[in-house]
Image (cartoon, grey):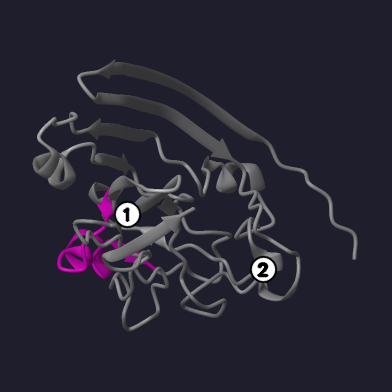
Amino acid sequence: LRVHNGSKSYFDAARVTLTVPQAHGFSGEVSYWFSKAIDFGTDYTSTVSGTTNRQGRSPSQFFVHDSMKGLASFDQPHALLVRGSYQTPRIYNRFASTLVGRWSLNGVWLLKNGTPFTLETGADGPGFGNVDGQQSDRPSLVDPSVLGRTIGNPDTSEQLMPRSAFGYITPDQYAGNLGRDVFRRGKITNVNMSIERSWTLPYDSALQLRAESVNLFNTPQFDTPVTTLSSPTFAKITNTLNGGRVFHFRLQLQF
């Protein structure tokens, strides 16, 4: 088996960053990215083994570049990252300082588009696909108004991507007219925060307390809906990509 890379990819991006210098115990940074990634179906996760050897292949042997050109599987045009840190001021009252003085609070907020995905008919047989031995046939588009939609909520996914908007291709058609990666998963948003404090102890030792949270607001990031048109669960979102809210606590003695 001989495998070679005959694809092309295009990636353009710009980033703007605003850095807030430390003042009154606060410092932070805000970064915004705009990017666009287009390719002809390459997929760096392919190992060319088993079912993965079909990744990035055209649904037909004809007009390969025309049918495969589309958004890259990692395309996320908008991304916003906000980072901030605040240290509570020193308090000269010994008791108050022990409780509220010199705590360090840190937070990170990430917001970005979800990645694109492609629909398939689910079968290479009469009434479903073009019967050419290739399992990645795409359906035909019946209702163009659904193009470009973001499908990110399990309560509305079936309404936004209805089965009636697509049709199976006939055996005499070389491919369906639906493009590659014309839909997008829901946005990714996540907030992580931490708080920590160190106390100086005798004999050059110190006690450090740290608490941190991953996905502080318990925001779900939903997986791709079922993309196989022939599946009874087509367009349903049945899973999440991230875990729930997690807290970590650490008490450390340094000497």
Q: Residue at x 33, y 63 (%)?
A: 248
Instruction: Please state which of residues 180 and 60 is positioned toward the viewer in this rendering.
Output: 180
Looking at the image, tell me whether mark 1 or mark 2 is earlier in sequence order: 2
Residue nearer the viewer, 152 or 148: 152
In the orientation shown, which residue stands out farthest toward the right? Answer: 1
Whether residue 148 can be seen here: no
Residue 218: percent from the left, percent from the top?
A: 21, 62
For this view, does 191 lie left or right of residue 55? left
Specify the label residue 254 is tagged with.
none
Please tell me which residue lies in front, 114 or 6.
114
Figure check: 155 above or below 39:
below
Find residue 150 and report its horizontal and vertical position in percent: 27, 51
Residue 16 versus residue 76: which sits nearer the camera? 16
Q: Which residues are magenta?
A: 149-167
Q: Looking at the image, how many numbered discs can be counted on the residues?
A: 2
Q: Is residue 79 above or below residue 204?
A: above
Label 2 sits on what residue type?
Answer: Thr
Please name the residue shown 64% across and 42% down the image.
Answer: 65
Quarter of the image for the N terminus: give it: bottom right
Q: Residue at x 43, y 62 (%)?
A: 119
Q: Is residue 163 magenta?
A: yes
Residue type pointed to by label 1: Arg
Q: Residues within 10 Å of mark 2 (few under 14, many from 20)?
A: few
Pinpoint residue 76: horizontal percent, then vertical percent.
Answer: 41, 40
SS assignment at label 2? helix
Q: Which residue is denoted by mark 1 in the rendering?
A: 210
Marks 1/2: CA–CA distance: 43 Å
Q: Residue at x 59, y 31 (%)?
A: 10
Across and down, in percent, residue 27 comes to 29, 24
| Mark 1 crowdedness (10 Å alpha carbons): few <14, some 14-19, many ≥20 | some
Q: Which residue is mark 2?
A: 52
